[in-house]
Image (spheres, coloured by chain):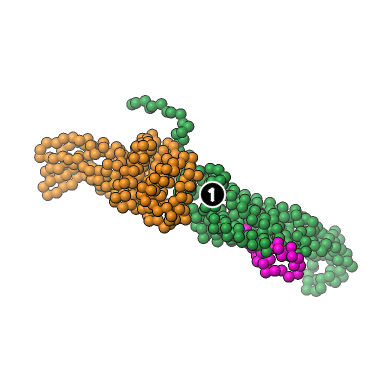
Chain colours: A green, B orange
Amino acid sequence: MNAETMIWLTWRQHRWAITTTSALALFAAYGLVSAELRHFQVTMTLAAFYGLVVQLGFGAVVGAFWGAPLLARELEERTYFVAWGQDVTPARWLRGKLVVLGLLAAVLAALVGVGDGLGGSEDRSWPMFEANWLVQVGYALLGLAIGVLAGLLTRHTLTAMAATLVCYTVVRTVLAVVARDRYLPVHRSIARWDQNPAVPNDALKIGDGFVGRDLEPVPVPDQCAGLVPNGCMRRTGSAIGTYTDYQPADRIDVFRWIEFGVCAALAAAALWLTFRLLRNGGGWRPSRSHRRDVSTAPVAPAPAQG
Amino acid sequence: MSVVAAEVSKWAIRGVSFELPPGSVTAVVGANGSGKSTLLNVLAGHLPPESGHTAVAGRVAYVPQHKPIYRNFKVADVLQFGRRMNAVWHNDLADAWLTRFKVPRRLQMGDLSGGQRTHVTLALALGARPDVLLLDEPLSELDPLARRRVMSALLTEVSDNGMTLVFSTHVVAEIGGVADRLLLMHDGRVLVDGDTDELLEEHVLYTGPHASQPPVEGPVVLARHGQAQSTFLVRSGGARVDEPWTARYVTLEELVVAHLERAA
């Protein structure tokens, strides 16, 4: 098996999924980039809006339409007898297909992630965190890996697609809501009563509150609950000022790398599990360990009679 | 030995052992659910045995019972698939097979009839020139004429290339004059394993007056008692008898049916 074989086979079996997904990605990239180049600063073109929708879901599309059917369809239609019954081993077959689809998905995702649909705005801003080629590549690889694993576990294409969408959405949500703000320790800005904490305009605010004498956050005591807390906290001496936690905008590139790293690590884990299951898994695992290679084996002496 | 199974157990099959010499044609015969397909799946490497082990010399091609092939492939795609996915590929062989059995080239596999799809899967298997060819119910979807032609073409491949052929069937009439080894399975076990010619020489049907015992020594496969006469199928090794008993050899079909009836 060589690269050409796997490209041919992948294209021959997945050409409709590849074609439609590529068209989708190219349209989205065109809509986003053209809007950005024409400097729409306040309103967004409809094309750019749809482009952002595609950007949001591109990893899920790759996972559901490329990843999930990869193994699930072979298992469901029982064509794995054909796929894995030739001289190419199942592990090499899967590896080859993953390399072809993974590279293609990465290129398309990078294109999708180039633009953000608004001209003039700084690309390195927190609201545009996901409008980045590296982040999108991470999402696409994550979707692909989740899809392949789901296909192997469910052995049913439609179930695998649904499972992929659910898992992918959960992972993305957890990353965005819980994990991303804390990739690095936050910057804390503290101000006395007569000032406001100094926070750069482009920073991502994480949280705020009151600080006590040791400059550590303090909770609002019961006596101030329900009142306007500032005046109460100041009057009672519970706090000496306020603080704001934030992530400065110059960290955004590091955060994008971290986001990519997290997605890539999750994808690698899912693929590792897939290969492991493929080799040692369920009752149908293909195995060639019992085959003797007669072409290289030495000629055995005739067994003694009796 | 070309194919060896030692105490193989998996699902329905329990403790199956046999050895098949290179170049042999073995018919695996048994009732529905007797474990034929499971056995072939284990030999092909698609199922790991629960216990025991199998050994197969060289490259294996396996055509399962449901004749799987990619539905949106055309003949040309299948040939290209075979060429690209195999270390050895004889395109003329596969192509000639498809021409011989008149498989339409322009249709997708999903649009072919069951028999035509069988021919495609057989062509894919043969084109790879395997050392061991495993076929699960290869003739089930073919018409009676095609059955004979396919079988004789397969036998030609076997004798030309020294291939070892193992095929399963539950139609006993298909194996007469084809298989040189019989592997008779029942309920996951091997009932009879042997050279068909030797088996046919060993088994003799004795008919004579009503008797509780056959007139010769040997394991009785089947005994039938009528009003005035008794018949015994005995694995006597061809022992002769005197009047009033008569003896005759049985056909392979009678032999198989007798063994299956006794086991049932």
Instruction: List x then y, in percent, for residue B71.
Output: 45, 55
Magenta stretch encompasses residue A62: no
Res A272 seen here: yes
Residue sitting farthest toward the bottom: A227
Tell me what residue is drawn at x 87 percent, y 70 percent: A235
Instruction: List x then y, in percent, for residue A110.
Output: 67, 55
Image side of residue A212 versus residue B165, left or right = right
Tell me what residue is drawn at x 23 percent, y 37 percent: B202
Give the camera-side residue of A209 and A263: A263
Tell me what residue is drawn at x 89 percent, y 67 percent: A194
Instruction: List x then y, in percent, for residue B23.
Output: 36, 36
Magenta stretch encompasses residue A52: yes
Give the camera-side residue of B219 and A250: A250
- Identify residue type, mark 1: Trp
In this view, A88 is above or below A243: above
Give the camera-side residue of A289 and A12: A12
Magenta extent = A32-59
Q: Quadrant of the N terminus of chain B?
A: top left
User: What residue sits right under mark 1 in the picture?
Assistant: A8
Residue sitting farthest toward the right: A194
Give the camera-side residue of A47 and B235: A47
